[in-house]
Amino acid sequence: MTQDKDHNYRPVVFRDRSAGYAFLTRSTAESAQTIEWDDGETYPLVEVEISSESHPFYTGRARVVDSEGQVAKFERRYGDQAPPGAPE
C-alpha cells in the first residue's frame, strides 16, 4: 500500500433502515451523519438498505422460485418459434 493514500479506517456504525438493526464495525465509509453509541462515544452513521437482520435468506423468509414452472410457461407462450434472424 502506498504511503500517499492513507485511508481513514475507523469505527463506523451501520444501521439497517428496514429492521432498525445497527452494528459497530471498522470501515473507511464516509458519512455526514453521526450517532451516539451504547459506549457513549459518537461515531459516523451509514444507513444501509438491507443487512442480515432483514435479508430473506438469513431471516428464513426466502421465496422459492419455481424455475421449472417458468420454463413451461415460456414453452407454452413461444413454443417452437425461431428467434428473429435465426437460420431455418
Image (cartoon, rainbow, N blue to C red):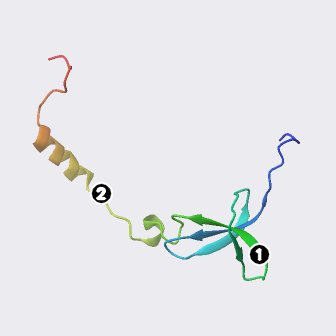
> Which label lies toward us, 2 or 1?
1
The picture places residue 78, in percent across and down from the top left corner, at 13, 38
Residue under the point 82% across and 43% down: 5
Give the secondary structure at mark 2: loop
Residue found at the far right of this picture: 3
Q: Amino acid at mark 1?
A: Thr
Q: Toward the viewer: 53 or 9?
A: 9
User: Element at badge 1?
Assistant: strand
Q: Amino acid at mark 2?
A: Val
Q: Determine the residue located farthest toward the front in the rendered image.
A: 32
Which class describes the residues within 10 Å of circle 2: few (<14), some (14-19), or many (20+)? few
Q: Is residue 36 left or right of residue 48?
A: right
Measured in 3D between alpha carbons, the distance from the residue under mark 2 to the one under mark 1, in whole angstroms, is 43 Å
Mark 2, residue position: 65
Location of the C terminus (image quadrant): top left
- For label 1, count other residues whose C-alpha is less than 10 Å away and answer few (under 14), some (14-19) or many (20+): some
x then y, percent, for residue 82: 15, 26
Look at the picture and state if 29 lies above or below 53. Answer: above
Residue 21 at x, y = what percent? 57, 75
**Mark 1, residue position:** 42
Residue beneath the point at 54% across and 66% down = 51
